[in-house]
Amino acid sequence: MIELRPFASLGGADHGWLDAKHHFSFAGYHDPERMHWGNLRVWNDDTIAPRSGFPTHPHRDMEIVTYVREGAITHQDSLGNKGRTAAGDVQVMSAGSGVAHSEYNLENETTRIFQIWLLPRALGGAPGWGSRPFPEGERSGRFVTLASGYEADDDALPIRADARVVGATLLSGETADYPLGRDRKAYLVPARGAVRIDDVRVNARDGAAISDVEVLRVTALEDSEIIVVDAV
């Protein structure tokens, strides 16, 4: 099953410095049909103006994965962590028992990110943060795991959720397969380009909620950059 969620149908709000689109109910946007997809709770498509960002605020009991599409985001938290994550790279914050953090675009250009929240497999635990580069060449023509809650994915950033975040870059006409499994759910968003899944076209920033699929087969209709959450 594939449910297409066109970008134009997403909720959201334009705050001036932040233009936020929500694939799932979030803040002032509520849609009872779009509360979550398995343990995927939030997928926000955020455009952040230069020299602006999210001031310090708290979180707990959530796994927060940030994929930077354009520009860069600078993180700072109450644990003493500080780091800059640039386009194509990923950061993960495990909020655990509680952490306060800020996320700023300190660049002179617009930053665009996907912010993905996953429900943890257990509450509490020590909070943590990590970031790493994922060169585009590593994802060329195939899916690679960016963040994972499974020990077998030791090259990925660790999260405390029964989920994976995977990415691929495909040239027009290329096809990539991802072994999902019929007992799991996937949510796919092209950061750029357009892809086809079965007979469904998914354009840049559209969402596709996918279930009851043993192998997810994605064909690029244009040069494309794809992010997928594999959830339960």
Image (cartoon, grey):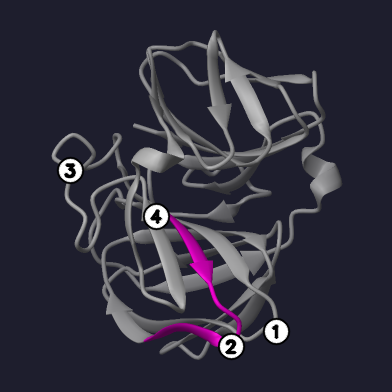
The answer to whether residue 81 is visible is yes
Q: Earlier in the sequence, mark 4 or mark 3?
A: 4
Between the residue at mark 4 and the residue at mark 3, the CA separation in whole angstroms equals: 13 Å
Residue at 74 percent of width and 54 percent of height: 134
83 relative to 64 in the view: left or right: right
The extreme left residue here reads: 32
Between the residue at mark 1 and the residue at mark 3, the CA separation in whole angstroms equals: 35 Å
Residue marked by disc 1:
108
Between the residue at mark 4 and the residue at mark 2, the CA separation in whole angstroms equals: 20 Å
Residue marked by disc 2:
51
Residue at 63 percent of width and 50 percent of height: 156
| Residue 189 position in % (x across, y down) | 53, 38
Residue 21: give its label: 4
Between the residue at mark 3 and the residue at mark 2, the CA separation in whole angstroms equals: 32 Å
Between the residue at mark 4 and the residue at mark 1, the CA separation in whole angstroms equals: 22 Å
* Three-letter residue code for mark 2: Arg
Residue at 46 percent of width and 79 percent of height: 17
Residue at 78 percent of width and 33 percent of height: 223
* Three-letter residue code for mark 1: Asn
Quick one: SS at disc 3? loop
Quick one: SS at disc 2? loop
Between the residue at mark 2 and the residue at mark 1, the CA separation in whole angstroms equals: 7 Å
Residue 31: give its label: 3
> Marks 4 and 2: CB-CB under 8 Å?
no
Magenta stretch bounds: 44-55
